[in-house]
Image: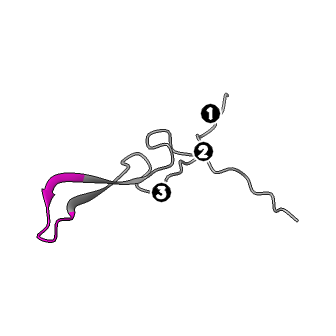
Amino acid sequence: MPQHTRPRPICRACDGFPVVAITTGSRHHDGTRTTLPVTCTACHGSGTRTPARRSVNA
């Protein structure tokens, strides 16, 4: 039987891809490219966002 799970809210800034590898343009001695891992600053590398707070009208 399928299990029903609630969809996770995806980060709007990174679209669910929180960590990417950016090439620096240089290469290692064996010929592979030098890359830097960069994480999303909005979700801090989780790929999801926290639900928005609800405002309470008094």
Mark 2 or 3 closer to N-term? 3
Q: Amino acid at mark 1?
A: Ser
Quadrant in which the N terminus appears: bottom right
Q: Is residue 52 left or right of residue 44?
A: right
**35 vs 29: above or below:** above
Mark in the foreground, 3 or 1? 3
Q: Amino acid at mark 2?
A: Pro
Q: Is residue 50 left or right of residue 39?
A: right
Q: Which residue is mark 3?
A: 46
Whether tag 2 and tag 3 are in contact, CB under 8 A, the answer is no
Q: Which residue is mark 2?
A: 51
Question: Could you tell me which residue is drawn at 38 percent across and 49 percent down?
Answer: 40
Element class at badge 3: loop
| Whole-number angstrom distance, CA of label 3 to CA of label 1 | 25 Å
| Whole-number angstrom distance, CA of label 2 to CA of label 3 | 14 Å
Q: Which residue is mark 1?
A: 55
Mark 3 or 1 closer to N-term? 3
Element class at badge 1: loop
Numbered range of the magenta stretch: 23-32
Q: Amino acid at mark 3?
A: Ser
Query: Which residue is more in the foreground, 43 or 18?
Result: 18
Question: Could you tell me which residue is drawn at 11 percent across and 70 percent down?
Answer: 29
Element class at badge 2: loop
| Residue 46 % position (x, y) | 48, 57
Question: Could you tell me which residue is drawn at 58 percent across and 40 percent down?
Answer: 52
**10 vs 29: above or below:** above
Mark in the foreground, 2 or 1? 2
Graded by Cα atoms within 10 Å as few (under 14), some (14 to 19) or many (20 or more), the crowding at tag 2 reads few
